[in-house]
Amino acid sequence: MSARLLLGEPVAEKVRQRIGGLVTQLAAEHITPKVAVIVATDNEATKWYVGSIARAAAKLSVACEVFDLGEATEEFIAETIKTLNADELIHGIILQTPLPQGVDVSSLVKLIDPAKDIDGANPVSLGRLSVGQDAFAPATARSVIEILEHYRIALSGKHVAVIGRSAVVGKPLAQLLLQRDATVTICHSRTVNLAEHTRRAAVCVVAAGQPHLLASNEVTAHSVVIDVGTHVTESGELTGDVQSDSVQPLVAALSPVPGGVGTVTTALLLLHTVQAATNFLERSRREEWQMSAGR
Ligand code: NAP
């Protein structure tokens, strides 16, 4: 028997349809949602990824402007973020890593206006998620949830093991799972006896950045496994954090690499942009109403 494959493409298509509906509503109000992507590297893989966001945006009538700053200083990147925060025509901001050596990413992400922080990079966004307030989650973390919900994998009352505690995947994902009443165990590099946690879990999400980490002895026939890892092999193939050859025949369901989480992420970045534009419209209307009511 082989696992049911939880593919990303049908999930991404559903997200694109939601974007289409919201873009039409915004167009009626003469608003074009727009995302700004700040790049400060010559890294080819990064440039390709940013290009793929721009191409996906164009297909969905979302404007996308890439700010290629080259080997910019931290001060210059900070000024760019502040300018974009103040620009009413920009609804979402992505600060693409890697950044030039010596530039402190953590100082810069704090500058992104949370209302425009469509990839949940500002710690304020993670803080808000943690206390159940409105915030954009990092698109990768939300992709995992969208996949689980699309394939109707129950989360309420279920034990979910998340391998990885980064601020971009593991921690925000744990918050999104808690919001859905899952019982969450966060595992990391110091976790003793990983298999004890992963075998007990109904759902196991692997975001460790370690190729082929999750092995067949760490899963059961009931496991639903979501592979978040992305690694390019020497032969140029994309692979994940799961030993898929040995795990796939054993488990109940698997979201594979390639074809899983990564497929949904770009669509979600654009959905967040469109949602940020919708929030902007609602805020403007509220402010207008308050002004006209003299409040
Ligand atoms: P990261 O910042 O390197 O964090 C990795 C986490 O995994 C850390 O918390 C680390 O523990 C834990 N870990 C490492 N080795 C482990 C082990 N042997 N056992 C248990 N836990 C271990 O990585 P990230 O940014 O979260 O990314 C994780 C993976 O997702 C990467 O492969 C990345 O390429 C991929 N990713 C995919 C997408 C997408 O759209 N598909 C987007 C972003 C990231 P410590 O905290 O103890 O060090």
Image (cartoon, rainbow, N blue to C red):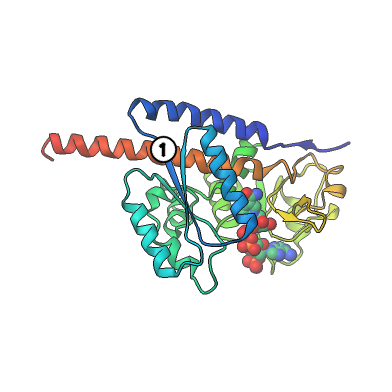
**Residue shown at 39% from the left, 58% from the top:** 81
Quadrant assignment for the N terminus: top right
The residue at which mark 1 appears reads as 33
Say which amino acid is labelled 1.
Pro
Give the number of marks.
1
Q: Toward the viewer: 85 or 211?
A: 85
> Residue 32: x percent and y percent?
39, 35
Image side of residue 129 versus residue 145, left or right: left
- Residue 121 percent across, percent down from the top left: 48, 56
Dividing the picture into quarters, in which one does residue 291 lie?
top left
Q: Residues within 10 Å of mark 1 (few under 14, many from 20)?
A: many
Given residues 124 and 70, the one toward you in this image is 70
Q: Is residue 185 visible?
A: no
Q: Is residue 8 above or below residue 93?
A: above
Would residue 222 be found to the left or right of residue 208 on screen?
right
- In the rendered structure, the answer to whether residue 161 lies left or right of residue 283 reads right
- Viewer-proximal residue among 271 and 171: 271
* Badge 1 element: loop
Residue at the spot x=13%, y=40% of the render? 295
In screen coordinates, is 162 left or right of 138? Answer: right
Q: Residue furthest bottom?
A: 102
